[in-house]
Image: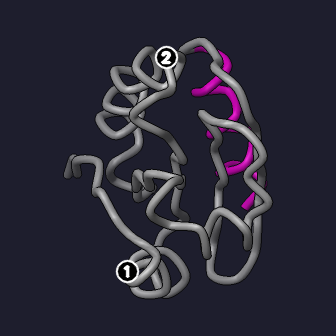
Amino acid sequence: MTKGVINISDDEFETEVLKSEQPVLVYFWANWCGPCKLMSPLINIAANNYGDRLKIVKMEVDPNPESVKKYAVEGVPAFRLVQGENLLGSTEGAIGKEKLLSFIDTHLNNN
């Protein structure tokens, strides 16, 4: 079953991420961020490849300062792989398809 990418806000973070039964890839982005525009198609590829065992959510950084602070996002694009209250992995900056999929694989397989 393939699931799409869900846009969330600070108000939805606990329900959509922390209480999720699946691990969650949180993609932090911004409208003004050029590299973020390059990452969007890769996020959709990840959702298609991992939608059966990984939830993927997008959070725009500017209107969601609580989650940005909690997960120490210093630059965008940024990725945090979370399961419950546990941070499984993190990376910041634009990355290629292979690196993104490898990042997900490494942390999902260690879980």
Q: Determine the residue positioned at 60% across, 33% down.
A: 77
Magenta part mainly helix, strand or loop? helix
Vertical comparison of 85 with 80: above or below? below
Vertical comparison of 104 with 11: above or below? above
Name the colour scheme: one colour
**Position of 77 compared to 88: left or right?**
left
Within 10 Å of the Cα at label 1, are there few (<14), some (14-19), or many (20+) other Cα atoms? few
User: For residue 95: magenta?
Assistant: no
Q: Determine the residue positioned at 44% across, 55% down.
A: 59
| Type of the residue with mark 2 | Gly
Vertical comparison of 14 with 92: above or below? below
Vertical comparison of 48 with 52: above or below? above
| Type of the residue with mark 1 | Glu
- Name the residue that disc number 1 marks: 12
Q: Where are the magenta residues, as a range?
A: 98-111
**Position of 26 compared to 99: left or right?**
left
The one of 73 and 45 positioned closer to us in this rendering: 73
User: For residue 104: magenta?
Assistant: yes
- Name the residue that disc number 2 marks: 34
Within 10 Å of the Cα at label 2, are there few (<14), some (14-19), or many (20+) other Cα atoms? few
- Residue 86 in percent (x, y) is at 75, 75
Q: Determine the residue positioned at 44% across, 51% down.
A: 60
Mark 2 or mark 1, which is nearer to you? 2
- Residue 39 in percent (x, y) is at 46, 22
**Position of 43 compared to 35: left or right?**
left
Q: Circle 2 — which element?
A: helix
Q: CA distance from mark 2 to mark 1?
A: 26 Å
Q: Earlier in the sequence, mark 2 or mark 1?
A: 1
- Image quarter in which the C terminus is found: bottom right
